Amino acid sequence: MSSMLSAVARPRLSRPSWLSPKVFRTEVLAGLVVALALIPEAISFSILAGVDPRVGLFASFTMAVVISICGGRPAMISAATGAIALVVAPLAKEHGLDYLVAAVILGGLIQVLLAALGVARLMRFIPRSVMVGFVNALAILIFAAQVPYLLGVPWLVYPLVALALVIMVGLPRLTRAVPAPLVAIVVLTVLTVAAAVTVPTVGDQGELPNSLPTLGLPQIPWTMDTLALIAPYAVGIALVGLMESLMTAKLVDDITDTHSNKTRESWGQGVANIVTGFFGGMGGCAMIGQTMINVKASGARTRLSTFLSGVFLLILVVALGDVVATIPMAALVAVMIIVAVSTFDWHSVAPATLKRMPLGETLVMVTTVATTLATHNLAIGVVAGVLTAMVIFARRVAHLVEVTSVLDPDGGSRIYSVHGELFFASSNDLVYQFDYAGDPDKVIIDMSRAHVWDASSVAALDAITTKYAARGKTVEIVELNKPSAAIHGSLAGTLGAGH
C-alpha cells in the first residue's frame, strides 16, 4: 500500500515534445535548412567584421549550441550577426582579432549582469507600432541583402532563383512532410552540378574551415588600458545583442502564441557570447532571418532545431565542405526572399489600415523603419521609434488635464477639481488655470480625479499655493491618492516654487 502511495506521490516527468517522431523529423530538417542558410551569412559577416571566415562560422556554431541550452526562447536561432559585426569591425581593423575576442567575452559578462538587473522587463515599454516597424525594416534589410547576389551575375542565376521560388511557394500546397527551402536547395544544387553550369556558389564567398574550433584565451595585455580600449565595444555588443535578441524573441512569441523567458534569454545570450569568445568567435545574437526560416518556413518549435543548426553547420563546413561549396547562391537568395516577403507586415501598410490608424502610430512605425534603413542597425531604429512614441504620448497626455471650479454656496470658498495625469508636460499650464485675484480667501483643490507623477507637478502645486499666499489667501489640497500624497508630502515646499 505504501509503495502504491509513494508511486502516486512521485511527479511524472514530462516527455520532451521533440521525442515524437513527427516533431523530431521537423526539428531535424529545420536545423539542416538553417545550417545551410547560416553558412553564407556567417562568411559575409566575417568579411564585414574584417576577420577570417572561420571566425564567423565557429561563432555561429557555438552561439547556436549554447543558446539552445541556456536560452529562454525555444526555436530561436542565435549566431554571428551583421549588427555585431558592425560594432566590432573598427576594433578588429585597428587592433586585431585578439582584442575583438576579448571584447566579445566582456560583452557577454555585461549581458549576464544586465539580465540580473532585470533588463528584460524593459520590453514592456516597446509599443506595438515600434514592433511593426522593426519587423518591416527587418524584412526590407533581408531583401536588400540579397540584391548584390542578383547584380552582375550570369543570366542563369535568374531562372534558378525563379525555380526555387516556385518550389517554395508550390510545394507546401502539396505536402509539408519536408521543408520546401531544403527541397529547393537540393534541387538547385543537383541541377547546377549535373549540368556543370557556372554560377556563384557558397564556396565563392570564402574559404571553409577544415578543423574544429579550439579553446583558448586572447593574447592581449591584461591591463586597465586594454579594459578601457575594449569596454566601449563590449557595451555596444551587449546592448545591441540584447535588444535584437529580445525583440526577436517577442516576435517569435507572437508567431507561435507562446511565452518565453526573456530574463533567461538575456543571460543565455551572455553565456553564449562568453563561450564563443573563448573559442575565438566574433560573438553574435539572435538572427531574425534564420529564426523565421526555422519557425515560419520549416515549422520548428523546440530547442532541438536550434541545437542541430549549430551541429549541422560544423559538420557541413568541416566534414562536407566540398559538397557545401557547390550549393548555388541562387538557392539561398531565393530562401531569404521568401523569408523577407513572409516577414513583412503587409496589413500594416494597407490603405484601409493606414486610414484607420492614428497618425502618431503611423509616424512611430515610419520613424523606426526609416532610421533602421538609414543606419542598417535595428537597435538604433528601435530606440528612435521608442523615443518618438514617448514624445507623441507625452504631447497627447499633456492635453488631457482639465480644471473645473465651483463657488461654495455661502461664497466663502471656491472648489477647484483637477482631472488627469500631472507630470512635467501636463503640469506646466496648471498654474494658469486659477483666478488668483478674483477667488475668495479660501481655495480648495480637489485632486481625487488626478494623479501626481513627478517633482514638476509638485512644483506647480507649490507655485499655485504661493501665488494665493501672496494675496493673503489659503489653499487646501485634498483627496490625493496614496502615491500622489507620498510624493507631494516629501517634496512640497522644498522645490523653490515661489522663486
Image (spheres, rainbow, N blue to C red):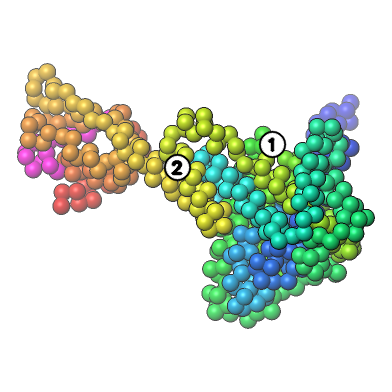
Q: Residues within 10 Å of mark 2 (few under 14, many from 20)?
A: some
Q: Compared with residue 195, is residue 3 higher up or lower down, i.e. above or below?
A: above
Whether 376 is among the magenta residues is no
Amino acid marked by disc 2: Leu
- Camera sees residue 74: no
Helix or strand or loop: what does disc 1 sit on?
A: helix
Q: Which residue occupies the extreme bottom position in the image?
A: 221
x, y percent for residue 130: 52, 43
x, y percent for residue 350: 55, 33
Amino acid marked by disc 1: Thr
x, y percent for residue 487: 32, 43
Helix or strand or loop: what does disc 2 sit on?
A: helix
Magenta region: 466-480
The residue nearer to you, when weighing 49 against 331, is: 331
Whether 476 is among the magenta residues is yes
Residue pointed to by mark 2: 363
User: Which residue: 71% across, 49% down?
Assistant: 336
Task: Mark 1 vs mark 2: give the one in front.
Answer: 2
**Dot 1 and dot 2 residues touching (CB under 8 Å):** no
| Left or right of 255, for residue 478 | left
User: Which residue: 65% across, 68% down?
Assistant: 49
| Left or right of 281, for residue 10 | right
The disc placed on residue 256 is: 1
Q: Which residue occupies the extreme right position in the image?
A: 194
The residue nearer to you, when weighing 354 against 209, is: 354
**Marks 1 and 2, Cα distance to the nearest angstrom?**
28 Å
